Amino acid sequence: MARKKLTVNLGNLTLTDSEYKKLMAAIHKTVSGALRKTDLPAVKKRNNKTLAAAATVTATISATFKDVNPGLSELSARHNNVTKKLTQSGTLTFDGVLSGDSIRIQGKSLGTAEISVDIPARPQTKKFDPGTFIFNFNIN
Amino acid sequence: MKSRKYMLILLLLCSLQIAAQKKSNDVNKILTADSLASGNLKDLLTSFFQLSFNKLTGPSKELNFSSNPYALIVRANPDAAIDTNYVKYKVLRKFNFGFGLKLDTAYRFNGFSSGIKFAIINKRDATTSQTLFEELGTDQLNTDLTGLQNPLTDTVENRYPRGSADRKKYQDLINDFFTDTTVLFNKLDPVFQKMVIEVAEAAKLKKLTSLLKTKPDINIRKKSQEYFSTLKNELQKKLLWTVSISDTTYKDQFLFSNIVLQTELLKGMGRSKPGANWELSIPASLNFLDDTLRSGRDLKRAVFSFDPGVNLVIRDKSNEQSFFELKFSGEYRHNFHQLYPGEKRDFVNFNGTLRIRVINDIWIPLQFKYDPANGNVFGFISAKLNFNGLAKK
């Protein structure tokens, strides 16, 4: 939700510095008291480690396969019934990712695999020895 | 007295090996193709580098270092291992180079040695095998696990609202179930265990359902990797064919005292049985040496050698790692050049090599040679250190 500014028009009123401070303090007190009565949700401090509850973002999945020829690795990532695939090191992007979602990863490689996502998630990076792998990026 | 001392060392190493085997039940351990390779293969083609002390009990001792140039490049630039770069080093990965010092009985310098080796055919390379890749993950357990991920995640996300602590908890448990190599299924949250079995049953994942119900004390990640280990073991039976050239210099002059052209073929035999398998090893070489009957130094003496044999590889059943190997071979030598007084043109020997893996990367080979014509037996003890641990990025 976009932020909106509350403006109070004082007309042609001329005030000294101390009068201005007193008036602003009174306005803040009155407005914040009125807000409490309307049961509006308290404003939370934004935490960089989680996405805003209703904000959708684009997530980029990066995969690096090592000690293996290209084409001898496979990664399949799925979010909201959209599946994207890689057969060598590279990236995949998913739009419309929400906090609480999961991006589902599965695949196999004859080399080592390191898979990461660029938005806050549990885990944010995962490494695998050669073989198969299945896991989810759980978005914070 | 000296041989008794070496036997005692050998016995000590055997007991160390047994102790190491006892410790090998570590749940975290994931086996790589490299760790499953036999000691015989490591001597033929090293994957990172090998330091060897050869013929420690013989009159001419050797201290050798051999390495793979690609492994050294990766050590300096880890990005060379990324698949899109890895493919560019195809030729370098097939090379080994080495150099060493020759020492006499009193451990005095007796000349330099160097050599290069190239794998003409290496079907044992697990990083380039299309067949291995196609078979990977096709077993029923891995197919079932792949089929479980979406319905299980959907169940958690439909049952617990976005932002709730339960949703986070069960989402994290899904990852523990699929990726953690230390947690057993029956030690996970009981509600989660029930949920997994219900979802697996509903999705008709019979193999997985039966496994979780009958053996709840399994680690699913470890179990799912077993099939890959079996595939890699099978790959270790494929053909490896190498050619090499090596030389030795004199101790007092930078001139070659001998040049050896060698080829060797290694191939697994028969069906793999848990615990043991056989390898066929066929080396042949042509050795150019100084003819000491002539004045000056030359390489006019040529000796052909053919040493076919079989290598019995005994593996630890718990982790499929080779820990004991016994190689028998018959050696035939033919001298193309003028014979020394009393020397035979053709010569036959019977050889035996016993290899013991002391710890993961250290092998102790004990080599015996039997000359049936004279009834003589010779024995040499060596030590081979494969430094693969240093290759880890």
Image: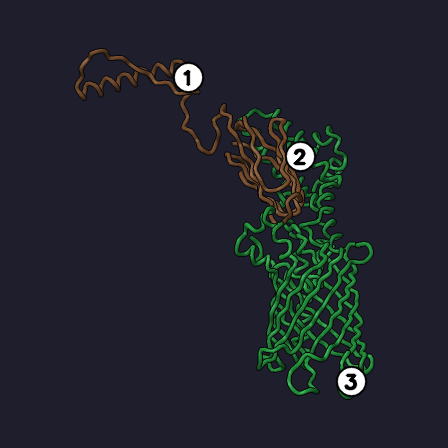
Chain colours: A brown, B green
Q: Which residue is mark 1?
A: A40
Q: Which image quadrant is residue B112 in? A: bottom right
Q: In the figure, is residue B286 to the left or right of A134?
A: right
State which chain disc 1 sits on.
A
Is B385 above or below relative to B148?
below
Give the CA separation, mark 1 to mark 2.
41 Å
Give the CA separation, mark 1 to mark 3.
106 Å
Name the mark nearer the viewer: 1 or 3: 3
State which chain disc 2 sits on.
B
Q: Identify the residue at horizontal 69%, vertical 69% (top origin).
A: B365
Q: Position of residue B375 (x, y in %)?
A: 81, 81
Badge count: 3
Give neighbour class at mark 1: few <14, some 14-19, many 20+ (Cα, 10 Å): few
Question: Disc 2 marks which amino acid?
Answer: Gln
Q: Which image quadrant is residue B360 in? A: bottom right
Q: Residue furthest top?
A: A11
The answer to the question of whether label 1 and label 3 lie on touching residues, with beta carbons closer than 8 A, is no
Question: Disc 1 marks which amino acid?
Answer: Leu
Q: Are marks 1 and 2 on the same chain?
A: no
**Pick the front one: B183 or B129:** B129
Question: Disc 3 marks which amino acid?
Answer: Glu
State which chain disc 3 sits on.
B
Name the mark nearer the viewer: 1 or 2: 1
Q: Secondary structure at mark 3?
A: loop
Q: Which mark is residue B193?
A: 2
Q: Are marks 1 and 3 on the same chain?
A: no
Q: Which residue is mark 3?
A: B343
